Amino acid sequence: MTIEDEIAFLERLPIFRRLGGGALRSLAIAAETHVMQPGEILFAAGDPADGAYIIHQGSITLNPERGAQVIAEVGTLLGESALFAENRRPATATAREPTVVMRISRATFLKVLDSYPDAAERLRELIASRADQWAREMENVRAALARGRRPL
């Protein structure tokens, strides 16, 4: 796959789409590719999270040890919050089939944002918009609960 293909792939994800060409090129160049076999664990619940993974080919099951059937497929970003802050993995991620993931470390992501301040500002706007949306949704839930109804 060419670097242009990698950039186009990253551009499909809303969080990366806002960054622009130069920043995306830097991320695509720095991204690590991991090829996984069926049953291989990408990360376990409780592991430190120091970056995000994008499923490039194949699929991942989340929490298979609990019988969970949550499946992440091509184009899914796993661990977005780990790009911004230290935290722990909330779930175990296991390859369902031969799977290829791209890993972007937090250090790389933050370095790219430092190098491209316009991209960082566009990303800040996206995150602020999401926070506003979540706040509105939570207010709707609160209001529905106050009226004694189940939220939608």
Image: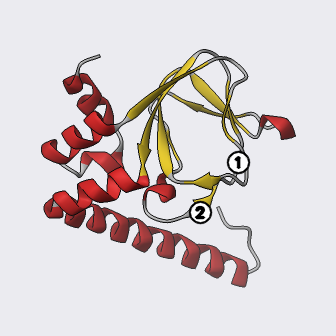
Q: Residues within 10 Å of mark 2 (few under 14, many from 20)?
A: some
Report the residue at 16% width, 58% height from top: 116
On the image, the x and y values in percent for residue 67 come to 85, 35
Report the residue at 57% width, 74% height from top: 138
The answer to which of 47 and 9 lies nearer the viewer is: 47
On the image, the x and y values in percent for residue 37 come to 64, 17
Q: Which residue is mark 1?
A: 91
Query: Which is more foreground, mark 1 or mark 2?
Result: 2
Left or right, 135 with reference to 17: right
The answer to which of 110 and 99 lies nearer the viewer is: 110
- Residue 12 is at least partly visible in this image: no
Tell me the number on the disc at residue 87: 2
Q: Residues within 10 Å of mark 1 (few under 14, many from 20)?
A: some
Relative to 105, does residue 152 appear above or below in the rendering? below
Inspect the image, locate mark 2, and give the three-letter code of the amino acid beneath it. Asn
Image quadrant where residue 124 sits: bottom left
